[in-house]
Image (tube, rainbow, N blue to C red):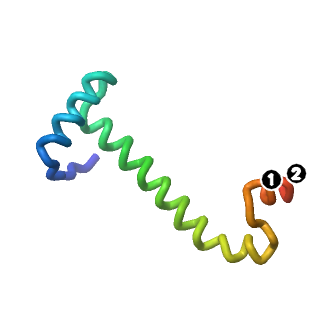
Amino acid sequence: MSTLTVRLPDELKRELKRFGKQRGQTAGDIVRDSLKRYLAVEQFLALRARSLPFAEAEGLLTDEDVFAALS
């Protein structure tokens, strides 16, 4: 495992510690989990943006259209 140093405003660090204490997690655990989630969402949004023109060309404009096509 690697180490990454991040500078945080004092208030954000206090909030992170307070949140971690409430959840029984370290600040590092929360930051790792948050970063994993952030990257997953960003990757999903990038994939969605790339595939949207193809979906629109097939008439798949809504979630309902996708579910109907898959059913």
Estimate the spatial distance between the alpha carbons at disc 2 and disc 1, rounded to whole Å.
6 Å
**Most foreground residue, 62 or 23:** 62
Left or right placement of residue 70 versus residue 46 in this view: right
Residue at horizontal 80 percent and vertical 59 percent from the top: 65
Quarter of image, res 61: bottom right
Q: In the figure, 38 relative to 54: above or below?
A: above
Asked where in the image residue 17 lies, by quadrant, the reply is top left
Residues at badges 2 and 1 in contact (C-beta under 8 Å)?
A: yes
Residue 16, compared with residue 59, is above or below; it is: above
Disc 2: which residue: 71
What residue would you read off at disc 1? 67
Say which amino acid is labelled 1.
Phe
What's the residue type where badge 2 is placed?
A: Ser
- Seen at 30% across and 42% down, the residue is 31
Residue 4, x across and y down, in percent: 21, 52
| Residue 48 on image: x %, y % | 60, 65
Q: Secondary structure at mark 2?
A: loop
The 10 Å Cα crowd at callout 1, few under 14, some 14 to 19, many 20 or more, is few
6 lies left or right of 49: left
User: Which residue is pictured at 21% across the width and 49% down the height?
Assistant: 3
Query: What is the total number of numbered labels drawn onto the structure image?
Result: 2
**Mark 2 surroundings within 10 Å by alpha-carbon count, few (fewer than 14), some (14 through 19), many (20 or more):** few
Question: What residue occupies the far left of the structure in this picture?
Answer: 10
Q: Position of residue 66 (x, y in %)?
A: 78, 58
